Amino acid sequence: MLRTSSTIPFNAKSRVSGAARSLALVSAAPNSYSMPELSVLDKLETELAGVRRALAAARLEILSIQSAEKSARFLALHDGLTSLPNLRFFRLRLEQALAREPRSRQSLAVLYFDLDGFKQLNDAHGHHVGDELLRIVGSRLAHAVRAEDMVSRLGGDEFVCLRTGEPGRNQLAALACKLFDAVRAPMRIGRHDLSVRPSIGIAIAPDDGLDADELMQHADAAMYRAKRQRSGHEFYSPQNAG
């Protein structure tokens, strides 16, 4: 009786063995990278995250420094009570205006303010009331002039305004009256109804001075004349100085 052979032909055996070996290699291989490669990538990602954190911290530090520098510049040029430009800032602006072409020197005037009876008011109601009154006066003056003009607090109850744009005496007189009325208007501070009267002196370049010191001194002298005369405002005149 003949038996059927179950022997697989040689070529078929080779194909089956090759497929088995390929399957074994695929099963043994990692999904994408070997373990050493994964360790390197993890390390790079960790270092990159650290660099990003360091850059973010540096950016915040730079912004903080810039903010502090901006704040320092503001404080150096502005009055701490009213936030108006201070004397230093005013002198810088006035000197810049006077340094222009000689013809344009005639296009500016200095108005010097003093508040009559402020010391008595401050003593009677306390410094907190006096400080608030100065803030209100400063705000009223700043809002009563044009954007291109400058109002500064010199200290105490003294303020000064730089007017540009070829101001004539009539225009300056009208401005002085406007500023007088703005300051004189009643104000409510706490439970106090108060009013303060300013005296204003005016000096015009170049007739009343060619440098900042001279103009401010002459405007100050005119202000004291206005205070003595109780006239509200006065223009500087050599005959009336002193």
Image: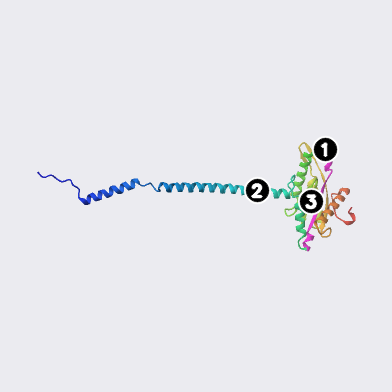
Please tell me whether mark 2 or mark 3 is closer to you in this view: 2
Is disc 3 placed on a helix, strand or loop?
strand
Q: Earlier in the sequence, mark 2 or mark 1?
A: 2
- How would you rate the neighbour count of disc 3 (Cα within 10 Å): few for under 14, some for 14-19, many for 20 or more? many
Label 3 near label 1: C-beta < 8 Å?
no
Q: Amino acid at mark 3?
A: Val
Is disc 1 placed on a helix, strand or loop?
helix
User: What is the magenta range?
Assistant: 102-125
Q: Which mark is residue 160?
A: 3
- How would you rate the neighbour count of disc 2 (Cα within 10 Å): few for under 14, some for 14-19, many for 20 or more? few
Q: Earlier in the sequence, mark 2 or mark 3?
A: 2
137 with respect to 36 (left or right): right
Looking at the image, is 26 positioned above or below residue 164? above
Label tally: 3
Q: Position of residue 173 (x, y in %)?
A: 82, 54
Residues 161 and 214: in front is 214
167 with respect to 4 (left or right): right
- How would you rate the neighbour count of disc 1 (Cα within 10 Å): few for under 14, some for 14-19, many for 20 or more? few
**Is residue 165 visible to us here?**
no
Q: Amino acid at mark 1?
A: Ala
The residues tagged by marks 1 and 3 sit, at their Cα atoms, a distance apart of 26 Å
Residues 63 and 104: in front is 63
Q: Residue at x 25, y 50 (%)?
A: 15
Residue 230 is a magenta residue:
no
Q: Residue at x 90, y 56 (%)?
A: 239
The residues tagged by marks 2 and 3 sit, at their Cα atoms, a distance apart of 29 Å
Instruction: Name the quadrant containing residue 191.
Output: top right
Residue picked out by circle 2:
67
Q: Position of residue 184 (x, y in %)?
A: 80, 45
Residue picked out by circle 1:
124
